[in-house]
Amino acid sequence: MSSAMPGPPQDPFDPQTNPYATPAPPAQPPQYPGAGYPAAPPVYPGAAGMPMRLNNGMGTAALVCGIVGLVCGITYFLWVFAVILGILAIVFGAIGKGKVGRGQANNGGSATAGLVCGIIGMVLPLIYVAAVDAAIDSIF
């Protein structure tokens, strides 16, 4: 019979005896020539920083006021709202077109459409009032 002599107790966390243990980290990380971050590019005077945010609010407000004013202008009983919203659309559209011209906005089409819808929305109630006035004058 052979009897095996037990050896010295083995450490279960020893990476050389336990194949599932985490390997020991190297003493010093390897050094590669030229490793690291590149140098920052030179900063020139007058270089642009962050680009300016575009402010498209006036053109959008002109378009919304113009469309709602146009719908109110088509409806005869809402002519007061059509006039008020038409004036607002014209003002917002003009300001929006000015911002597009200065490069502060990029929705010139919306500003123009709001301006046109505001003008039409203000003219329609005037046509209705003129037609009603002509009808009343022809009757009496």
Image (tube, grey):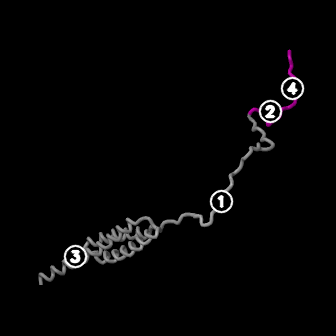
Q: Earlier in the sequence, mark 1 or mark 3?
A: 1
| Residue 2, placed above or below residue 106 | above
| Residue 45, placed above or below residue 40 | below
Residue 113 belongs to magenta span = no
Residue 18 belongs to magenta span = yes
Contact? badges 1 and 3 (CB < 8 Å): no
Residue 42 is left or right of residue 22, and the answer is left
User: Mark 1 falls on what kind of element?
Assistant: loop
Residue 82 is left or right of residue 127, and the answer is right
Disc 4 crowd rating (10 Å Cα; few below 14, some 14-19, many 20+) is few
Residue linked to disc 1: 42
Residue 6: mark in rendering:
4
Residue linked to disc 3: 128
- 1 or 3: mark nearer the eye: 1
Tell me the quarter of the image containing the C terminus: bottom left
Residue type, numbered disc 3: Tyr
Residue type, numbered disc 4: Pro
Residue type, numbered disc 1: Pro
User: What x and y, as percent, mark residue 71?
Assistant: 29, 69
Q: Earlier in the sequence, mark 4 or mark 3?
A: 4
Q: Of residues 44 and 75, which is closer to you in this image?
A: 44
Q: Of residues 125 and 42, which is closer to you in this image?
A: 42
User: What x and y, as percent, mark residue 28?
Assistant: 80, 44
